[in-house]
Image: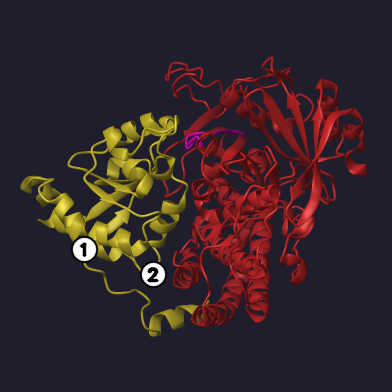
Chain colours: A red, B yellow
């Protein structure tokens, strides 16, 4: 409790929120003075920003202590439609705050950046619309011999849409400004009133590459809210799927980063391994990406003995082939020339933005939601959290390599010790709880995925906020590209591999 | 590296035989293009992929078409960087309102004759996102669609069968 005592002192209400097997965590209702204390705590580094979202006439902050052992939610009612800006005190909150204004029409008083973010002026009423042709006011860049390069939203590769506005002096990038929101689908509004099964399908499609992580985060939040006890076997099967997802994505990223340095043999070989992981997932769980296999209460797919054997063969295959690829990466100076010292992310920035994932761990931050705050079954599994200090593209490749190795070891442990028993429990809102809330943090391949949910007595979703790790990584990409050459942007971008869909919601 | 290359040279290929073209896709495509257009497109198709709001699941599986197991290029089908070089727009996602204009402009930038293939359940009718204020509700609401490849996401094999049906139609 000590970590949040300054907010607690100023709180007008307090309630416990279940964190499933963790917590209970606290929800503080605050007035504007208490709200600003939370902002000051963020500014002073007393808390990490975990999430910041709104609903009609209310705003919420989710915070953790610096060691990520406790989580709290701070809520401010703003019936007047106005609330004091947190971004004025703490810049990493800027885009989240602009989103709150876009989606809920709430005004952040004193906000440093009042431009819309996700709202491009094309949504129907009641959203404020502008002429679609009105130019977005990119930040001014002044100086001699600067030129601008607009890129997107439709990119050259098979990737998601977003706009990048480069300002360059010769080849060197002076400033990159991102404009996102192109794939905003209104997921939070679709969640309102949705039955759990439909809401879980939506959560699994916030960012398709992290569908297992989102599935687990949503399920854990619902289980926390309802007090559902998940069968042991289901927890272990979830971890199994999560580690398969991590390996598949890391293999894809390692290959794609090398390919962006024109070293395509890595893409080809990593692509073979990635395809084998996906085929194994398809064989064992009936879907290559394992979509909709994690459900509130447990999992929807059983692993039979044949499936376990197939995964065992996969592990042997990856263990045999992957070290050669690592050696290949490590021994090519032409490749290292592109990745070493490129796209350096300062550790203090990574820490301040609480960005999580590979990006943070390659810049000296020891974060991993599987350990801090942790969740079952990882408390019973042995694994290391690789942390490197160098902060460049090369470091982000190496963190991924080490994590593939750790995930292989985790899957071996899971297969060895997979408990027997049922794979799903019934989820029911306990009688007498008016609007139960739950919160979960789950480590996806990209970083910590947070899902907050509030249910109605009839078991449907009242409100849900899924927060992708990309929210805190996208702004840092703007920082790392500064001073690099334009041609290195694909490398930097791929080494971050932020989600557009997860961010745009 | 030498070992890896030698093994690739002397080992059996990983590329798998092509699946048969999708019958339903052939039926949907029948009569879409006249003979003259078919002759001009021949047996080679250039594809521009456009994500119009997908969750990125479809992109993952479209990417997989380029891996050695599916090796899309052996059929003369390849992905290109600009709509100006494309014969086919491969569109994913429910077409968000924020991507509406970008999709229209990409379509306009693609020279005729051209095809539009809508990939995934949400590109068909909005899928799981149907009913949202932020989407238009499927690719055909914005540009004419010649072929739908359903699935959430469709597997690379399903994608391949759809694209091979397209190639059959193009060759007449």
Residues under numbered marks 2 and 1 in contact, where contact means CB atoms less than 8 Å apart: no
| The disc label shown at residue B21, or none | 1
Task: Give the foreground label among 2 and 1.
Answer: 1
Quadrant for residue A98, please give it: top right
Of A300 and A361, the residue lying toward us: A300
Q: Chain of mark 1?
A: B
- The chain to which mark 2 is attached is B
Residue A326 vertical placement versus A38 (above, below) = below
Asked if residue A105 is among those painted magenta in the image, a careful observer would answer: no
Q: Which residue appears farthest toward the bottom when viewing the image?
A: B10
Numbered range of the magenta stretch: A175-186
Helix, strand or loop for disc 1 = loop
> Looking at this view, is A191 or B40 the one in front?
A191
Residue at image point 65% right, 75% down: A414
Which numbered tag is attached to residue B55? none
Relative to A249, is A107 above or below?
above
Determine whether, in the image, residue A295 is placed left or right of residue A438: left
């Amino acid at each position: 409790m000590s970590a949040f005592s300054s907010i607690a002192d100023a709180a007008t209400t307090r309630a416990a929120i279940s964190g499933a097997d963790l917590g209970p965590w606290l929800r503080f209702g605050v007035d504007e003075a208490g709200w600003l204390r939370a902002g000051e705590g963020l500014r002073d580094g007393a808390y990490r920003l975990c999430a910041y979202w709104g609903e009609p006439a209310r705003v919420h902050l989710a915070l953790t202590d610096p060691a990520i052992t406790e989580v709290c939610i701070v809520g401010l009612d703003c019936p007047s439609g106005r609330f004091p800006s947190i971004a004025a005190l703490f810049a990493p909150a800027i885009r989240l705050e602009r989103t709150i204004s876009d989606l809920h029409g709430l005004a952040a008083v004193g906000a440093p950046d009042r431009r819309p973010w996700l709202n491009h002026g094309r949504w129907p009423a009641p959203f404020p619309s502008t002429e679609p042709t009105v130019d977005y006011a990119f930040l001014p860049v002044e100086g001699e011999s600067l030129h601008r390069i607009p890129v997107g939203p439709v990119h050259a590769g098979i990737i998601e849409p977003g706009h990048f506005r480069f300002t360059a002096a010769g080849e060197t990038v002076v400033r990159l400004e991102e404009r996102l929101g192109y794939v905003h689908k209104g997921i939070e509004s679709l969640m309102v009133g949705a039955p759990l099964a439909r809401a879980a399908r939506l959560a699994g499609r916030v960012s398709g590459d992290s569908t297992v992580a989102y599935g687990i985060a949503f399920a854990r939040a619902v289980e926390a809210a309802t007090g559902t006890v998940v069968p042991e076997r289901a927890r272990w099967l979830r971890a199994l799927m999560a580690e398969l997802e991590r390996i598949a994505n890391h293999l894809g990223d390692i290959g794609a980063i090398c390919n962006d340095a024109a070293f395509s043999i890595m893409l080809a070989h990593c692509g073979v391994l990635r395809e084998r992981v996906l085929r194994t997932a398809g064989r064992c769980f009936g879907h290559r990406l394992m979509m909709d296999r994690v459900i509130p209460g447990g999992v929807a797919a059983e692993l039979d003995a044949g499936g376990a054997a197939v995964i065992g063969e996969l592990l042997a295959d990856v263990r045999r082939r992957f070290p050669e690829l690592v050696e290949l990466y490590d021994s090519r100076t032409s490749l290292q020339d592109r990745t070493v010292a490129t796209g350096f992310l300062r550790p203090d920035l990574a820490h301040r933005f609480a960005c999580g994932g590979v990006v943070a761990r390659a810049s000296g931050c020891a974060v991993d939601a599987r350990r801090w705050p942790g969740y079952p079954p990882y408390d019973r599994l042995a694994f290391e959290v690789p942390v490197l200090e160098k902060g460049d593209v090369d470091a982000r490749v190496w963190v991924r390599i080490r994590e593939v190795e750790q995930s292989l070891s985790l899957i071996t442990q899971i297969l060895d010790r997979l408990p027997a028993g049922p794979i799903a429990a019934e989820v029911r809102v306990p009688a007498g709880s008016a609007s139960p809330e739950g919160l979960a943090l789950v480590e996806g391949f990209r970083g910590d995925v947070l899902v907050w949910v509030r249910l109605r007595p009839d078991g449907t979703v009242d409100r849900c906020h899924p927060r992708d790790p990309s929210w805190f990584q996208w702004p840092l990409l703007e920082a790392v590209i500064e001073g690099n050459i334009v041609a290195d942007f694909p490398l930097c971008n791929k080494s971050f591999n932020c989600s557009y869909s997860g961010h745009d919601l | 590296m030498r070992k890896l290359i030698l093994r690739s040279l002397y080992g059996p290929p990983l590329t798998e035989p092509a699946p048969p073209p999708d019958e339903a896709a052939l039926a949907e495509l029948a009569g879409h293009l006249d003979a003259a257009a078919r002759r001009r497109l021949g047996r080679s198709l250039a594809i521009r992929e456009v994500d119009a709001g997908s969750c990125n699941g479809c992109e993952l599986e479209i990417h997989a078409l380029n891996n050695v197991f599916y090796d899309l290029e052996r059929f003369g089908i390849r992905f290109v960087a600009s709509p100006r070089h494309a014969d086919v727009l491969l569109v994913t996602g429910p077409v968000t309102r924020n991507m509406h204009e970008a999709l229209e402009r990409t379509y306009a930038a693609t020279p005729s004759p051209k095809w539009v293939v809508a990939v995934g359940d949400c590109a068909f009718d909005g899928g799981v996102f149907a009913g949202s204020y932020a989407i238009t509700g499927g690719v055909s609401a914005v540009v004419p669609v010649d072929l739908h490849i359903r699935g959430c996401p469709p597997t690379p094999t399903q994608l391949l069968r759809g694209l091979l049906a397209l190639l059959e139609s193009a060759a007449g």
